[in-house]
Amino acid sequence: MTILDMTADVPAPRDAGGPLLEVRDLHVEFHTRDGVAKAVNGVNYTVSAGETLAVLGESGSGKSVTAQAIMGILDMPPGRIPQGEIFFHGQDMLKMSGEERRKIRGRQIAMIFQDALSSLNPVLSVGYQLGEMFRVHQGLSKKEAKAKAIELMDRVRIPAARERVNDYPHQFSGGMRQRIMIAMALALEPDLIIADEPTTALDVTVQAQVMDLLAELQREYNMGLILITHDLGVVADVADKIAVMYAGRIVETAPVHELYKRPAHPYTKGLLDSIPRLDQKGQELYAIKGLPPNLTRIPTGCAFNPRCAMAQDICRTEIPALHPVTERDGGELVGRGSACHFWKETIHG
Amino acid sequence: MAERSPEDEATPNVSEVEVVDAATESEAVAAIEAPVHRGEPILQVRNLVKHFPLTQGIVIKRQIGAVKAVDGVSFDLHQGETLGIVGESGCGKSTVAKLLMTLEKATAGEVFYKGQDITKLSGRALKAVRRNIQMVFQDPYTSLNPRMTVGDIIGEPFDIHPEVAPKGDRRRKVQELLDVVGLNPEYINRYPHQFSGGQRQRIGIARGLALNPEVIICDEPVSALDVSVQAQVINLMEKLQDEFNLSYIFIAHDLSIVRHISDRVGVMYLGKMAEIGTDTQIYDHPTHPYTQALLSAVPVPDPEAREGRERIILTGDVPSPANPPSGCRFRTRCWKAQDKCATEEPLLAVPERFAGQDTPAAHESACHFAEEKDVVHAV
């Protein structure tokens, strides 16, 4: 695949001075008993300070594996990064030593996981776990760390933080636990936060509270945010730009409004058509036929071709590059790209 | 789908129960096997209550309270329709499902299936009810035994109800079921791990269909599936409903999917039904503040529609069902709450101000200050 540099068509960052994070042609594979599973096959994206990139995909699309590679928490082996670069503040993290990466992790890049209950230690109080960040990274005393923990709990709007600081994770509700996870990620004021399905385990009413909080804190600290999700609805609210992943590749990139209005890849289009609407009762749902591919046997050519209604011979032989998407008259569409041989037909009909 | 018009608003939620007196077990079985006309109530739930006791002490156990999971719920399910039940986790929707399946014993209240109170049945009559009410579970990864072949999983119900399929005929019957749910009949000897999530859910549906039930209770049947596969399973369920004349109770937390599949929708909060009506009444003309908040919080995959909509962000969490608030249970999170709400429990009924009027707002809602508010459409 030719590297169509996504940096070129990214909307101007709010903070001038180059992207915070740049992933270039990243490949990740896992050696399994069934063969080599190619989880990520050449992903490129950038995130600037203050910007939210949503990475959208189904299970097995490689969205979480990419994040784990950035964070440096991939299990290797069985995982392997045969190719690619991940620049953070202009330095390739994949060339750093373990010790150097450890200093970045938590301090400059933090991660929020889906399941807060299993990410927190059940036998330690939340105050202790929050304070740990300060004790370990900043060498504060126990007392100072606790005061900082209370401050953080206030920041993420946990009521009565002073009284609750000694409570254990099971004494908090799901939404409150996720707030504690957010507090922990924010503790050292990182430049970049990766949130992997942060609201999937929560009820809709709580989901809205948590997403709003995350967006607000991001603006306040001017952080970069990578939001990984399978939920097209959640993305619509907070993201600036979206990258849609399928079988380890980015198949479409677009500013958030554009993507929903005019998808330029048949997969994105199919996904949007297959969700029922809240505001009207529809007819039969459009369903993308078939199943997502097995990563040990990704179809040749475009990975989506066996499920695609538009597939032609070229789709079975040639992997489509991420073409820049333009208006019908050739006018530029900033930040848009589609990895489909027939993107013109898809977007312009 | 065409004959199940959403405009069919004449049917009230709760109708008169015609109790069928059955002196003997055989009479009860006969009543359970009797056909029901389309649109007639097939399942009538009245004041259903389930309290789980909270105990203290190891040797001498004392009851110190109860988790009021379901606390007086009434509704009808009509033949051939889909009743959606929505609500946040802990509202009691899954407990209702278990009670209808007689997997849990109700603390109080009745569930009438064709006029027979199934909470009081036993022996052959209970077995007949259980054949007629089947369930499809949420997680296709844990609800299928990994050591049984697909043929054994789908055929297992026949061991308990051999009258449905005689022994020699079972393999053919299982293959037929696989075909019906869109799986290759040759997969009969495969194991669950050889299938994807969506295919496993099809196996779960085939097992639910095996005994030719009349009612299927679906507890979050698509929430564990990927978006592109969800639509396939939903379409299959709609097709099967028409083909086999099934009635569904569809429990889910995804409000868009519930609207798509349901004829009527009930909204539960902390063990009570807050509002119930046709899909148009609930989604386009909600009158209960909780329904309005729930609908407004749904993230919609359309940023433009989103920006025009009013959002109500609820503060706080759902109170503990062991110690629910007095009066209206929603009052602790409600922006309309007044003194009356703390002292007087609002009943599930058509609000007085809408009573007798020909408006979609005239449907049952348990709120003292019921008011219509559109939160789904952009203004």
Image (cartoon, helix red, strand yellow):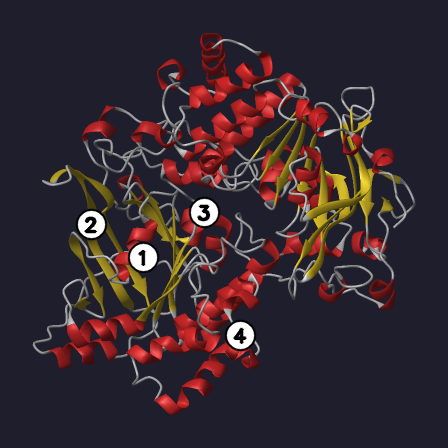
Amino acid beneath label 1: Ala
As measured in the structure, the alpha-carbon distance from the residue carrying label 3 to the one carrying label 2 is 27 Å
What mark, if any, has residue B49 been given in the picture?
A: 2
Q: Are marks 2 and 4 on the same chain?
A: yes
Instruction: State the residue at coordinates (66%, 48%).
Output: A57
Q: Residue at x 19, y 52 (%)?
A: B47
The extreme right residue here reads A330
On residue B97, which mark appears? 1
* Circles 3 and 4 on the same chain: yes
The Cα atoms of the two marked residues, 2 and 4, are separated by 42 Å
Q: Which mark is residue A78?
A: none
Mark 2 or mark 4, which has the lower sequence index? 2
* First-in-chain label (1 vs 2): 2
Callout 4: SS: loop
Classify B88 as above or below B8. above
Is A257 located above or below residue B213 in the figure?
above
Same subunit, labels 3 and 2: the answer reads: yes
Query: Label 4: which residue?
Result: B190
In the rendered image, is residue A85 in sight? Answer: yes
- Which amino acid, by three-letter code, is at mark 4? Arg
Asked whether residue B1 appears in the rendered view, the answer is no
| Comparing labels 2 and 4, the label whose residue is closer to the camera | 4
User: Front-most of A304 and B295?
Assistant: A304
CA separation in Å, label 4 and label 1: 30 Å
Q: For label 3, count other residues whose C-alpha is less than 10 Å away and answer few (under 14), some (14-19) or many (20+).
A: many
Q: Position of residue A31 (x, y in %)?
A: 69, 54
Q: What's the distance in space between the residues labelled 1 and 2, CA to CA?
A: 12 Å
Quadrant assignment, res B75? bottom left
Closer to us: A310 or B290? A310
